[in-house]
Image: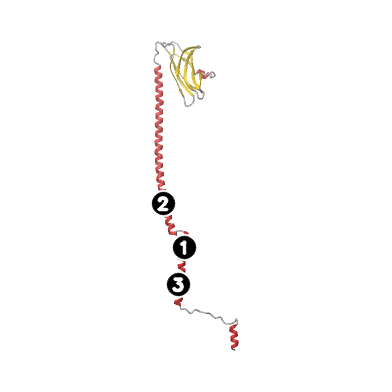
């Protein structure tokens, strides 16, 4: 019988034996608390190490973001103030430029009016009776000036019949403009040799007391006029002529 019990206990079918701890529950609670404390301390250590390794924490990042946002707002406000000042200065500058241009335009207008008044004064002065030594047709005034920055020239001529004019004078005007170009001296004749009948007619004269002639011509490029010989011709003969130095 004993041998059978011994063999049964040694076989696979022997009953299982459970080993239970004999520690009291306060001791087990203390051990659990110590384990939790160690785990929490390990977690805090790992967090601090990770924060030091990765950079500032969320609070510092939030503070930095707030600081940068504040600086951005201040910069934007300063930019707006600067833009307002620039716009104000640009407005004042535009007003000053407009006023300056208006003044310059007024000055140019006054200069043109003064020039016209001088020309009219010279014209009316030329209408005074000629001297006793002047007889027949005389050239009372002549003016030649550039029309613009190109080589185009404009002339004004006043011819008067002195003394007692009992009949109309009929004739024409011829001009020889002497100019230099590239070191050479040349003569430009008016009216031109190839002038159209309308162009040639502009130099005809037909008057009783006086006649005013105005016209324009273009010199070759780079030409500089120095003198003009004005000749009054009637019936193929020169009635009077006068040279004007420019």
Mark 1, Cα crowd under 10 Å, few <14 / some 14-19 / many 20+, is few
Residue plotted at (41% across, 54% down): 67
Residue plotted at (43% across, 55% down): 64
Tag nearer the camera, 3 or 2: 3
Given residues 137 and 190, the one toward you in this image is 190
Given residues 84 and 160, the one toward you in this image is 84
Residue plotted at (39% across, 40% down): 89
- Marks 1/2 in contact by CB < 8 Å: the verdict is no
Residues at marks 1 and 2, CA–CA distance in whole angstroms? 32 Å
Mark 2, Cα crowd under 10 Å, few <14 / some 14-19 / many 20+, is few
Query: How far across and down, in percent of the image, does residue 179 sit?
Result: 49, 20
Query: How far across and down, in percent of the image, does residue 148 sit?
Result: 47, 26
Residues at marks 3 and 2, CA–CA distance in whole angstroms? 49 Å
Indicate which disc residue 49 carries: 1
Residues at marks 3 and 1, CA–CA distance in whole angstroms? 22 Å
Disc 1 is placed on an element classified as helix
Query: How far across and down, in percent of the image, does residue 229 sit?
Result: 47, 17
Disc 2 is placed on an element classified as helix
* Residue 132 occupies quadrant: top left
Query: How far across and down, in percent of the image, does residue 72 sit?
Result: 42, 51
- Which residue is tagged 3? 34
Q: Earlier in the sequence, mark 1 or mark 2?
A: 1
Indicate which disc residue 135 carries: none
Q: Earlier in the sequence, mark 3 or mark 2?
A: 3
- Marks 3/2 in contact by CB < 8 Å: the verdict is no
Tag nearer the camera, 1 or 2: 1
- Which residue is tagged 2? 71
Of all residues, the one furthest to the bottom in this rendering is: 1
Given residues 69 and 8, the one toward you in this image is 8
Q: Earlier in the sequence, mark 3 or mark 1?
A: 3
Q: Which quarter of the image is occupied by the C terminus?
A: top left
Q: Which quarter of the image is occupied by the N terminus?
A: bottom right
């Amino acid at each position: 019988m004993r041998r059978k019990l011994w063999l049964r206990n040694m076989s696979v079918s022997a009953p299982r034996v459970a080993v239970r701890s004999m520690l009291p529950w306060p001791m087990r609670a203390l051990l659990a608390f110590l384990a939790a404390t160690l785990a929490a301390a390990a977690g805090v250590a790992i967090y601090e190490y990770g924060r030091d390794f990765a950079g500032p924490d969320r609070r510092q990042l939030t503070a930095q973001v707030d600081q940068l946002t504040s600086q951005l707002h201040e910069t934007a406000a300063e930019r707006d103030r600067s833009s307002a000042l620039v716009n104000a200065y640009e407005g004042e500058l535009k007003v000053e430029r407009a006023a300056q241009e208006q003044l310059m335009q007024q000055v140019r207008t006054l200069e043109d009016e003064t020039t016209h008044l001088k020309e009219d004064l010279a014209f009316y002065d030329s209408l005074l009776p000629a001297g006793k030594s002047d007889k027949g047709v005389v050239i009372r005034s002549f003016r030649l000036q550039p029309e613009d920055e190109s080589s185009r020239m404009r002339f004004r001529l006043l011819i008067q019949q002195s003394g007692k004019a009992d009949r109309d004078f009929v004739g024409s005007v011829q001009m020889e403009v002497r100019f230099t170009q590239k070191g050479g001296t040349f003569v430009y004749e008016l009216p031109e040799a190839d002038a159209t009948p309308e162009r040639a007619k502009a130099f005809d004269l037909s008057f009783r007391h006086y006649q005013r002639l105005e016209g324009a011509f273009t010199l070759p490029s780079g030409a500089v006029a120095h003198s003009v010989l004005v000749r009054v011709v009637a019936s193929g003969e020169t009635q009077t002529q006068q040279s004007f130095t420019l």
